[in-house]
Amino acid sequence: MTVYVAHRLLQALFVCLGISVITFLLLHVAGDPVLLLLPQSASDADVALLKQKLGLDRPLVVQYIAFLGDALKGDFGQSLFTQESAFSLILERMPATLELTLAGTLVGLAVAIPLGVLAAIKRGSFLDRLSTVGAVGGQAMPIFWLGIMLIILFAVKLRVLPASGRGTLAHLILPAITLGVYLAPLTMRLTRSGMLDVLTQDYIRTARAKGVVERVVLFKHALRNAAIPIVTILGIQFGRLLGGAIVTETVFAWPGVASLAVKAIRTYDYPVVQGSVVFLALLIVVVNLLTDLAVAWIDPRIRLGAGRD
Amino acid sequence: MENVKLVIRCSLALLAGLLLAVTPVAAAPKGRVVAALGSDTSTMDPHMHTERVGIIIQQHIFDSLLGRDTKTWHPVPHLAESVTSVNATTWELKLRRGVKFHNGEPFTAESVKFSIERVLNPDQKSPIRGNFTWVKSVDVVDDYTVRITTVKPYPLFHEILTFGNFVMLPPKYVREKGDAHVARNPVGTGPFRFVEWKKGEQTTLEANEQYWKGAPAIKTLVFRVIPEPATQIAELLSGGVDLIRAVPPDQLSVIKSSKVARVTATKILRVVYLQMDGDARAAKTPLTDVRVRRAVNHAVNVDEIMQKILGGLAVRTPSGGNPLAFGTDASIKAYAWDPERAKKLLAEAGYPGGFEISLNTYAGSIVNVEQVAQAAMGYLGQAGIRVKPRHFADVGQYLANFRGSKLDGITMASWGYNSVFDSDAIFYTHFHTGEPYAYNTAKEMDTWLEEARSTVDTKKRRELYSRFQRFIVDQAYWVPMYGQYTIEAVSNKLNYEASSDEIMRIFAATWKD
């Protein structure tokens, strides 16, 4: 198991390195932060001077190596706009993003799994069809639109929840629902098909024949086996979830890393973009590692298989 | 005797009562106001950024040397009580006495010298340094008198002292605490004192009850960052925020029909125009021929764009200069919309069948940019000028191409005068040889612009700018279009109006009781 984890971490390091090269090149090709830092009327001499001060006049390779050297020491450089450490800017925003993605995942799972199980048990029923239609609708609905609709309904019309911002639990409800609805459809459909598949297996029939209580059959024998693809997909979906978080954070003025990164991209604040992208990538890698470990925990065959390697 | 005393006492009491009744007693600040901004400031150090949102927040914490009259927008005394010209290159400033920074430090001539020299210090890396290179020296005469010497005569002196970022800092505090601390903990002399900054989220300010102009009416002022305009409007309608900036024109009716808020709009300095590459700076083009440029001017129906697309919230600028700015010649007439005349001029120039040309546009600053660009394309098409649109979704890219001589053909551009209400702030940058945005140049224009820039004689400057504007209109270097409006929305609880210099003056807002 230790070898397995070490192997995955080494992989993660290369993923982050690759990502840093790509973001670095894309940003430098895309535009120039100096023009956004200076007033529009700045002379060419002012532009050249500031470029030199920020070290942006050096060859790209030199700039990248300097960045990499500092990054290895945990220093992503200073934001070009705030002159603050990019790393501390990201750390400041991290709790908000984690809170939102975690709450969104919980809402998503709380809706998707019971619905998926119910739809599978009552296959072909009205409930099954309704949840399938709901899932298709949920998948088709732009997350941005859903967020605005929830705000109009609960904040403007009913006035029961705040429209935006972060602070109390009430502030978390609408963004978490928005992100949850984004995550739920795929998970629900996977649960449903996974359960349908498992419920026809011989061991389920055996369990039922042995007289095991239906609840235990469903949740211990069936769901545990159906959960393997769900957990795997959850890891993969995490990247998508962060994408959804960018939109959710913007709509709800949620002060997280995703919206920090969006603003930094718009202003070519290289150090902050690089820092946040590497950070988010690391997060995705870690979450995927954790889901792999969770799958191994759920499914002893994987654990044993890994042990034999 | 006792009776006399009693009469005197009663009379005094009555007098005191009367005095209290007639003297307006400033009510203590009360209540909380939340204003929504689309993005956050990158720093609380006013000398270290050029962002509008930062200027708005910091104008509530700090004071500049001169303020603005909110009717004429002319500079008026603020921290400097008077500005007098000693000679062509020396100005004397008399400062207001008894003003204190929020930390108790007194505001003196030393604070002015320190603040100006801080911006000018190359090691400070202030992005607004370029706006102040005309300063030769700052000398303290006494505690409340400062002399500023300029490199050469500098006519924009009063204007620049109102500059949004150019505010006074407390020298002792900045020296002791250092820049990093100041960037998070601003201390000024302004109407509000800084309480807290949750980066990317909100800034909280508290009324400065000892403010030299009298305490503001609002006790707590919060600037919240809400990037999405639809969310800002939802917050306004649900009572979560009291003020929003930059209302999209298509949302005006939503606010107007609500019972909780109203719209406040006013003319601002930003002008929109079609810049033509008359010098063929980017590429060979028919636009080097004045007849072609005049044809382009006759082709575009600016009045219809203003009415149909902007709902009348725009002001025509026949010379390209904004009527709000000093030196704009109001007597100049715009080219009439006349497609037939445009076609005739094109035929005379050797383009009877028209020609194909690029129209560069960019996202940001221009209200309803897509619709305005589509309309312009349609009008040009009617005159036989076939437009190839080229859109920059990114302002940085657009500016880099503009400065880098890469915007060929026609460019739908806009200019905000850097908040300086003077013709120099637009014409020099756009028409002086060698300037990054100048795509049309001529020797006589250089002479006029340089002369107007180096004399403090207002009459002479007005004449020079008038001559200059007649020239550029005759040469049809650009298609002057219109000056924009700022459209803000405010809760019905407040008395508040939008400002032409795009600074939200929430410090001047009062409660409707």
Image (cartoon, rainbow, N blue to C red):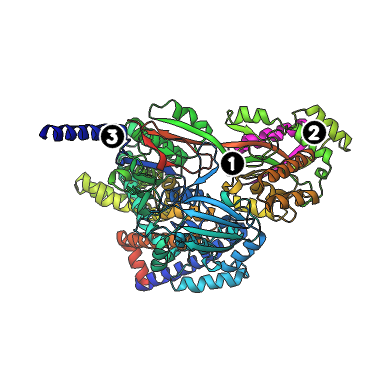
Give the residues drawn in magenta, as a range: B363-392
Task: Tell me the residue that label 1 is attached to.
Answer: B269
Q: Alpha-carbon neighbours of circle 1 within 10 Å: few (<14), some, or many (≥20)?
A: many
Q: Quadrant of residue B128?
A: bottom right
Image quadrant where one finds the N terminus of chain B = top left
Q: Which mark is in front, 3 or 2? A: 3
The reply to whether residue A142 is in sight is no
Q: Alpha-carbon neighbours of circle 3 within 10 Å: few (<14), some, or many (≥20)?
A: few
Q: Secondary structure at mark 3?
A: helix
A170 lies left or right of A9? left
Q: Position of residue B433 (x, y in %)?
A: 75, 54
Task: Tell me the residue that label 3 is attached to.
Answer: B19
Disc 2 chain ID: B
Q: Position of residue A157 (x, y in %)?
A: 35, 30
Task: Tell me the residue that label 2 is attached to.
Answer: B384
Q: Position of residue B354 (x, y in %)?
A: 82, 36
B285 lies left or right of B457? right
The earlier-in-sequence mark between 3 and 2 is 3
Can marks 1 and 3 be said to lie on one chain?
A: yes
> Depth check: A161 or B305 in front?
B305
